[in-house]
Image (cartoon, rainbow, N blue to C red):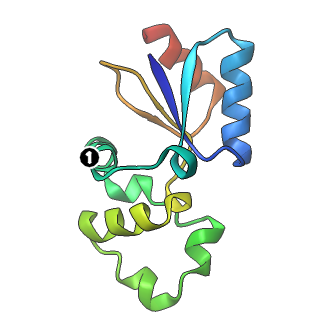
Amino acid sequence: MITLYGIKNCDTIKKARRWLESNGVEYQFHDYRADGLNAELLNSFIAELGWQALLNTRGTTWRKLDEARRESITDAASAAALMSEMPAIIKRPLLCAPGQPMLLGFNETNYQQFINEV
């Protein structure tokens, strides 16, 4: 089963969901806020993609952090703690399917290739 991870009110999540639905792709949506994000799941994301890729340093959540807090994020453990506390700081969407590499971000061409390989 394909799972799309993110936050439901994110514009990019909305685009990804519309694309999946318009292409007849069955998927499960996991909202970090509503469904939670446990350490095991987050650590699996970090293990595959790296904490730098997952940490959204362009978004509002990151920009609202004070400088000392931003500078304290220097490794996977500190990034994981921040992402657990503030799931909105995780780049999204994240598309996962068993046996497939995870796909971070939304791009129609990449989504089509991902779906073709599932």
Q: Residue at x 74, y 46 (%)?
A: 11
Q: Position of residue 30 (x, y in %)?
A: 52, 36
Front-most of residues 65 and 111: 65
Q: Quadrant of the N terminus?
A: top left
Q: Is 65 situated left or right of 21 in this image?
A: left
Q: Amino acid at mark 1?
A: Glu
Q: Is residue 65 above or below residue 42?
A: below
Q: Position of residue 22 (x, y in %)?
A: 75, 15
Q: Quadrant of residue 98?
A: top left
Residue 99 horizontal/vertical position (percent):
30, 18
**In the rendered view, would you say 59 is above or below 108?**
below
* Residue found at x 71% / y 23%: 19
Q: Secondary structure at mark 1?
A: helix
Q: Quadrant of the C terminus?
A: top left
**Picture coordinates of residue 72, whole percent (x, y):** 35, 82
Q: How many marks?
A: 1
The residue under label 1 is 40
Give me the residue at 30% from left, 71% from top. Answer: 78
Residue 42, above or below 107: below
**Dot 1 surroundings within 10 Å: few (below 14), some, or many (20 or more)?**
few
Left or right, 47 with reference to 56: left
Q: Is residue 2 above or below residue 59?
A: above
